[in-house]
Amino acid sequence: MASSALRRFFVYGTLKRGEPNHHVLTRPENGVSKFVGCAETTVKLPLVIGTRYNIPFLLNKRGTGHFVRGEVYEVDDAMMEKLDELEGYPEFYDREIQDMKILDDGE
């Protein structure tokens, strides 16, 4: 199978390094995933950590809340499919193109 072009993907919850679902991004059998850097949204958004499973999610209320910190990865189509499966896309979340500020965390 030919590899696809990589696209950038921002994670802010359980997919970040040290969090319980990060393993999905690190398994080669899931596809390609390359860490780009730590990042922050350029627009304030409300980050909610809710449900009985402590699942983080963003509310689409631009300008309210905080700048949300997370990580940016470059992923191929195969990895995107795995991430969509994990997250229940498109039933449980929307995907949007957003500007991100890559942070200089000394990495």
Image (cartoon, grey):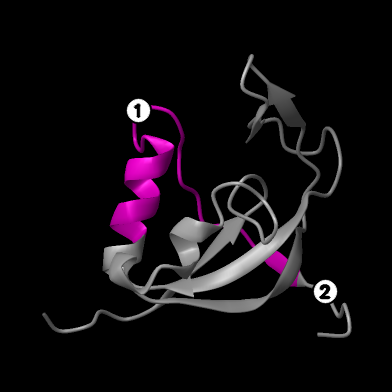
- Circle 2 residue: 103
| In this view, 52 is above or below 77 | above
Q: Amino acid at mark 2?
A: Leu
Q: Secondary structure at mark 1?
A: loop
Residue 93 pos. (x, y %): 46, 34
Residue 83 pos. (x, y %): 40, 52
- Residue contact at pointers 1 and 2, CB within 8 angstroms: no
Q: At 50% from the left edge and 49% from the top edge, which residue is drawn?
A: 96
Left or right of residue 83, residue 16 in this image: right
Residue 43 pos. (x, y %): 77, 50
Magenta region: 80-101
Tell which residue pokes out farthest to the top in this image.
52
**Which quadrant of the rendered structure holds the N terminus?**
bottom left
Dot 1 or dot 2: first in sequence order is: 1
**Residue 91 badge:** 1
| In this view, 42 is above or below 27 | above
Left or right of residue 17, residue 9 in this image: left
